Amino acid sequence: MDFASSNINKYNEINDMVSVRRNSIKVTFKKMELKEIQSDSLLEVAENKVLQAFKINQKEIFVEDDGLFIEALNDFPGVYSSYVSKTIGNVGILDLLANKVNRNASFKSIIAFHDGHKFKSFTGEIKGKIPFELTNVGWGFDPIFVPENSDLTFGQMDLKTKNKISHRRAAVDKFLKWYLNPRQK
């Protein structure tokens, strides 16, 4: 099964999650720069990306889109996480939260699948907090997200530990449960 993304880190995480499961699928990385539509809906963005990827690939494919939703910032950056990461980055997020006591946040992930006929989407979410200081390990927002029941940011965790609890893991598990069950397809 092909996975489309411009982000090799997402592929590495997903491939690790899938490869440790028995009777699973083999995931192939298809590097694609997909346009991100302007939308307040993570689901709409993911579904649009999987349509683009299918047009290029012409066989079943899936994508993953995610966002960091910070309570004190009215769920910003949310669906705009990729743009915010490229522009103001983690330091900018911490600056926006400088005087905020409420550090609650959640990471949401959507896996969108398309085979030319069917669309299926699967959501995963994990709650956590934004620390007061940046940890300089990890990619994306991992250095500034501490999941519930942890003292470490995602960036400070090894891949296996992060992949056991992440938002992406929850979405991948739902996707695989559906995909590997012929009665549900």
Image (spheres, rainbow, N blue to C red):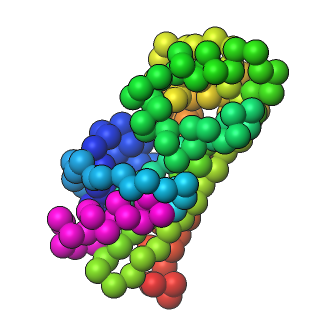
- From the viewer's perspective, is residue 35 above or below residue 134? below
Left or right of 74 on screen, residue 153: left
Query: Is residue 121 something that shows in the picture?
Result: yes
Location of residue 132 by image quarter: top right
Number of callouts: 0
- Which residue is pictured at 45% across the width and 84% down the height? 185
Near-viewer residue (149 or 53): 53
**Residue most toward the bottom?**
183
Near-viewer residue (129 or 14): 129
Position of the N terminus, as image quadrant, is bottom left
- Which residue is pictured at 38% across the width and 64% down the height? 48
Residue 33 at x, y percent in the picture: 24, 48
Question: Residues in magenta?
Answer: 44-62
Q: How would you classify the magenta stretch by its main secondary structure?
A: helix
Look at the image and say whether residue 51 sits in the magenta stretch.
yes
- Which residue is pictured at 39% across the width and 82% down the height? 118
- From the viewer's perspective, is residue 152 above or below residue 173? above
Residue 108 at x, y percent in the picture: 59, 49
Look at the image and say whether residue 119 sits in the magenta stretch.
no
Left or right of 102 on screen, residue 7: left
- Which residue is pictured at 44% across the width and 58% down the height? 45
**Residue most toward the right?**
101
- From the viewer's perspective, is residue 151 above or below residue 70? above
Residue 20 at x, y percent in the picture: 44, 50
Left or right of 156 on screen, residue 112: left
Query: Is residue 172 something that shows in the picture?
Result: no
Near-viewer residue (176 or 50): 50
Residue 47 at x, y percent in the picture: 42, 66
